[in-house]
Amino acid sequence: MGYRTLLRDHRSVLSIAFLAMFSSSLGQSFFVGLFQAPLAEHWQLSAGQFGTAYTVVTLAAGFVMLRVGPSIDWVAPRRFAITVLLALLVGVALMTLSPLKRCLCLSSPPGA
């Protein structure tokens, strides 16, 4: 199968993939780079403390994904999307409302 055939036969799937890729910025690193300073200032964290917290949450999410990842194949896509959106909503609410550093660990949903 050549590229032309691929583009012609799978135009709809490639369009959705293109839209998803370019509408999601660059992911987690983009978000952290953009909002690191205001978040660290809000919780009165040094750059080292913020980096340590980011590392711990990222590693924890990675280990959770090793366990949970394979089971995602058995969940309906709509149910998975709704669950992820609700988890992100709860995470954002906790992050917004928590004035304490120790509450930050509750506001980071797995994979964030």
Image: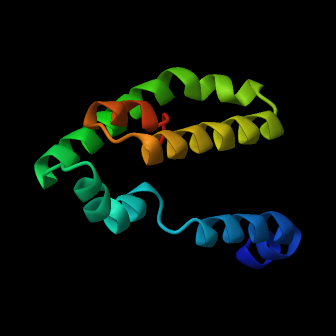
Residue 1 shows in the view:
no
Query: Quick check: 5 left or right of 104?
Result: right
Residue 10 in picture, x, y percent from top left = 83, 66
Where, by quadrant of the figure, is residue 19 drawn? bottom right
102 or 27, nearer to the observer: 102
Where, by quadrant of the figure, is residue 17 drawn? bottom right
Compared with 50, 10 (above or below) is: below
> Residue drawn 77% across and 71% down?
15
68 or 28, nearer to the observer: 28
> Residue drawn 61% across and 25% down?
70
Which image quadrant: the N terminus? bottom right
Compared with 53, 42 (above or below) is: below
107 or 31, nearer to the observer: 107
Residue 6 in picture, x, y percent from top left = 78, 69
Farthest residue to the bottom: give it.
4
Residue 21 shows in the view:
yes
Residue 82 in picture, x, y percent from top left = 75, 39
Query: Quick check: 103 left or right of 89?
Result: left
Its colouring scheme is rainbow
5 or 39, nearer to the observer: 39
> Residue drawn 25% across and 63% down?
37
